[in-house]
Structures are given as C-alpha cells and as structure tokens.
Image: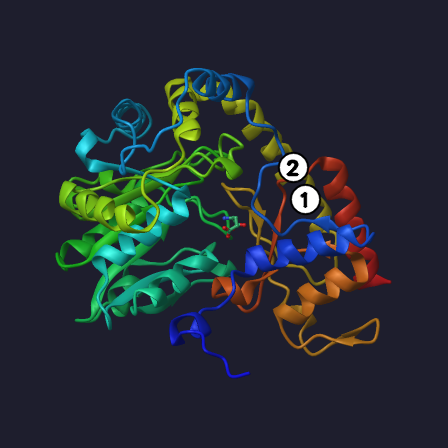
C-alpha cells in the first residue's frame, strides 16, 4: 500500500534518544541483560514531599481542565524560582507551563519561526531541536564544536554563522549531550555579538541548571540587553527526578508567552492538574532538597570518567554539568572489532549494544559524528558493569 502519510512526518527523523531507549527496553523484555545508558533519565524516585503534594491534590479534587498557561499560583512560584535561582524578574503573564520542556521548546519555535528562517544550533545539541525546527519549516544550521574546545563555540564562530535569514539561536547550558557549562563571561562575549543583530531571538534551554558540578549557572536572559529577546526554558524532569510528570515552562517577553498559550490552547490545552500542584511544592522548596541527587551524580561522573579513561581509543572531556559523557570515539573508525567493521558512530553504538549489551546514543543525532553519548544517570554498580563490558568488547 502506498504511504499516505504527510511529507512532514515522512521527513521527520525519529528521536534517537527515545528510539535507543525503546530498543533497549525491547531487548530487556526479551530476556537480554541490557544496561540502558541511552536515556537522560534520573534513576531516583521523585522526592516524597513532591509525591505527597500530588496525593493531596488528588484528595482535594484537582481534576478539572487547567488554565492553558498553568495555574496562577504555580506561575507565581515559577516567578519566585526565577528570581531566587537566576536573578530573573518575570511576571506571571510572562510564564507558560507546558507538558515538559520539550513542549515549551516546540511552542516557542512554532510561534517564532517562519518557513525558511534559519535557527542556529550549537553542535553538539539535543536531538529534538533540529527536528522541532524542521516541523516549523525552519532550517537548522549547525555551528560545530568539538572536544578540543570543550564543545563550546567562540564569538567569532557565532558571528560567522549569522546571515540575514537567522531568526534564532538555541543555547543549552549545561549542555546535553556534552555536559559543558558556559561561564557568565563566555555568555557575555557571545551576547556582544548578538547585540549587533537585534532581530535574532535566543532560546536558552536551562533544563540541566541544577545538575552542575562547579561552574555557576548563568541565565542568558540575565544579560540586560538580552532579556527582551530571550526565551528561558526550564522544567522539573532532571533535577527533581520527575521525567514522567511532564512539566516544563518558559519565561519570555509577554507577547511571546501569549503566543505560546495560543498555540498550546489548540494542541494540548493546559497541562496535567496533579503534576502542576506537585510542581508548586517542588519549586517552593529549597534547592538543598535535591542536592543529594546532584552529589550522587558527581560521584558517578568521577567513576565513569576514571573507568572510561582506561579504555583504549576513548577520548574524553570533563563535563561540568548534566549527567552525560560524550567521548570522541573516532579512533575506532575504519577498524574491525570482533568481526564488526566500525565506519561511524552509529556502527559503534550498535557494536556496543550487540557485543556488550550497553545502550548508548550515536553522536550523529546530536550533530557530532565522532562521538557517542553515555548517560550516567544509573547506579554506580550499573556504571561499573557497563564500562567493564565495553572495555572487554573493545579490548578482548
Ligand atoms: N532529554 C532526554 C535525553 O536526551 C530524554 C529523552 C528525550 O526526550 O530526548 O535523553
């Protein structure tokens, strides 16, 4: 039968992170002892005080449709969070709550990007940015960086990538997949370039804000000249171990927030009532409440770096945030290991899945063909076992 699907969906790539996670899940269900290090998902339980707030919300009969942009008291909590953690002043009419940061990003891109507009992505970038831009008929344009610059771009690179068609640049610090964190000074340098191009918007994805190992988090919108042009995206999934609760939000100029609400109102409406009530508890709490998870991620980071640096051919940087390592594995290209020819990062990721039963994600999906992403949001036991298996598969 002929494929009757739209050109839009036929041209859309599958999310590489979700695809690999699904593959790992399927193998596991079939009895294969897979260690899943593909998905960026904390393995902790949602803290009890958040769960209790959700239970209370059910008891209190929160069951009706919610305001499209989120409950007002939640938006006020978000404003307080922005002020407390980021020194950013937003009013509730500048906030839109959505079904995960992914929807916040999709809303923003849908309301700002016209067909043919260029959106600059700093590679490596999260897999869904480019797909979401394509859905809006924009052009994802990569600015490449690699391990030699700690996966960061310079102001000159940014300036050289800007054309008359550039409408937006997406920045993400701490970065998924590289773990790189831009310092305030580095962001100020980039903002000096953007000051020359007032028609460009900045989407700043700060979902990994709290998973930070030393370089203080700095919000791009904190730069006065950038505030009116920046859409700050954040969410609950990573820092609060709430991936399945699906809560993300933006702080933005209010005309953009209003447009995001209009978009969301036609697609999904207001997000889940129980999750919104729980989010108030999460955001009103001190960030110290989640520090134990960050401390544990820091231990795991040390562990995985120590172990991986003993594996021949793997080149690593020191990620300062998030919970991924993004090694350069180009040493293996052109080599045959255990009868399998490795031509590229996808081959390598498949090799690891088949020969060591460890799920990772190919760097191609993140715009970095020399790398693979390994998530260390898994127990130390699992990490040790996984890297041991990888070493064995590679070195025999
Ligand atoms: N953001 C996470 C990741 O990169 C979750 C999966 C996804 O939505 O891409 O693994």
Q: Nearer the viewer, residue 80 or 57?
A: 57
Where residue 112 appears, as percent x and y from the top left, is: 21, 57
Q: What element carries label 2?
A: helix
Q: Which of 70 and 93 is in front in this view?
A: 70
Image height of 143 relative to 112, above or below: below
**Residue visible at 28% across and 22% down?**
73
Q: Residue 304 carries which label?
A: 1
Q: Assign the N terminus to one quadrant of the image.
A: bottom right
Q: From this viewpoint, is residue 154 visible?
A: yes
Q: How crowded is mark 1: few (under 14 residues within 10 Å), some or many (20 or more)?
A: many
Q: Residue 23 carries which label?
A: none
Q: From this viewpoint, is residue 90 visible?
A: no
Q: Assign the C terminus to one quadrant of the image.
A: bottom right
Q: What element carries label 1?
A: helix
Image height of 381 relative to 316, above or below: above
Where residue 340 appears, as percent x and y from the top left, is: 78, 75
Picture quarter containing residue 346? bottom right
- Furthest residue toward right: 396
CA distance for labels 2 and 1: 6 Å
**Residue visible at 51% across and 60% down?**
15
Q: Do the residues labelled 2 and 1 touch (CB within 8 Å)?
A: yes
How many numbered marks are there? 2
**Residue visible at 34% across and 53% down?**
106
Decide if ligand 1 comes within 8 Å of the CB at mark 2.
no
On the image, numbered disc 2 is attached to which residue? 300
Where residue 285 appears, as percent x and y from the top left, is: 41, 17
Q: Residues within 10 Å of mark 2 (few under 14, many from 20)?
A: many
Picture quarter containing residue 209? top left
Where residue 52 appears, as percent x and y from the top left, is: 51, 17
Give the left or right position of residue 295, taking residue 159 as reference.
right
- Furthest residue toward bottom: 2
């Amino acid at each position: 039968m002929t494929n009757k699907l739209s050109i839009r969906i036929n041209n859309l790539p599958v999310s590489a992170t979700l695809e690999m996670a699904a593959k790992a899940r399927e193998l596991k269900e079939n009895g294969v002892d897979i260690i899943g290090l593909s998905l960026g998902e904390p393995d902790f339980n949602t803290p009890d005080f958040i769960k209790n707030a959700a239970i209370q919300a059910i008891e209190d009969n929160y069951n009706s449709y919610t305001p499209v942009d989120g409950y007002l008291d939640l938006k006020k909590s978000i404003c307080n969070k922005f002020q407390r953690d980021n020194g950013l002043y937003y009013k509730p009419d500048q906030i839109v709550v959505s079904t995960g940061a992914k929807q916040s990003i999709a809303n923003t891109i849908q309301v700002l990007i016209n067909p043919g507009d260029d959106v600059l992505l700093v590679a490596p970038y999260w897999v869904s940015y480019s797909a979401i831009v394509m859905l809006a008929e924009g052009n994802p344009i990569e600015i490449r960086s690699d391990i030699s610059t700690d996966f960061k771009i310079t102001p000159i690179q940014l300036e050289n990538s800007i054309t008359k068609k550039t409408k937006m640049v997406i920045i993400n610090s701490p970065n998924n997949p590289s773990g790189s964190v831009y310092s305030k000074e580095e962001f100020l340098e980039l903002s000096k370039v953007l000051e020359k191009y007032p028609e460009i918007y900045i989407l700043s994805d700060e979902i990994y804000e709290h998973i930070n190992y030393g370089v203080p988090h700095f919000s791009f919108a904190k730069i006065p000249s950038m505030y009116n042009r920046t859409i700050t995206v954040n969410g609950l999934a990573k820092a609060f171990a709430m991936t399945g609760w699906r809560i993300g939000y933006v702080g933005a100029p209010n005309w953009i927030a209003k447009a995001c609400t209009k978009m969301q109102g036609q697609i999904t409406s207001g997000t889940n009532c129980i999750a919104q009530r729980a989010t108030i508890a999460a955001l009103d709490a001190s960030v110290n409440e989640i520090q134990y998870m960050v401390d544990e991620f820091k231990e795991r980071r040390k562990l995985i770096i120590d172990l991986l640096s003993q594996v021949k051919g793997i080149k690593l940087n020191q990620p300062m945030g998030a919970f991924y390592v993004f090694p350069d594995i180009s040493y293996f290209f052109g080599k045959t290991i255990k009868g399998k020819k490795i031509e590229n990062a996808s081959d390598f990721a498949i090799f690891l899945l088949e020969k060591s039963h460890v799920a990772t994600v190919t760097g191609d999906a993140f715009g970095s063909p020399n790398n693979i992403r390994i998530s260390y949001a898994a127990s130390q036991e699992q990490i040790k076992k996984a890297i041991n298996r990888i070493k064995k598969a590679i070195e025999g």
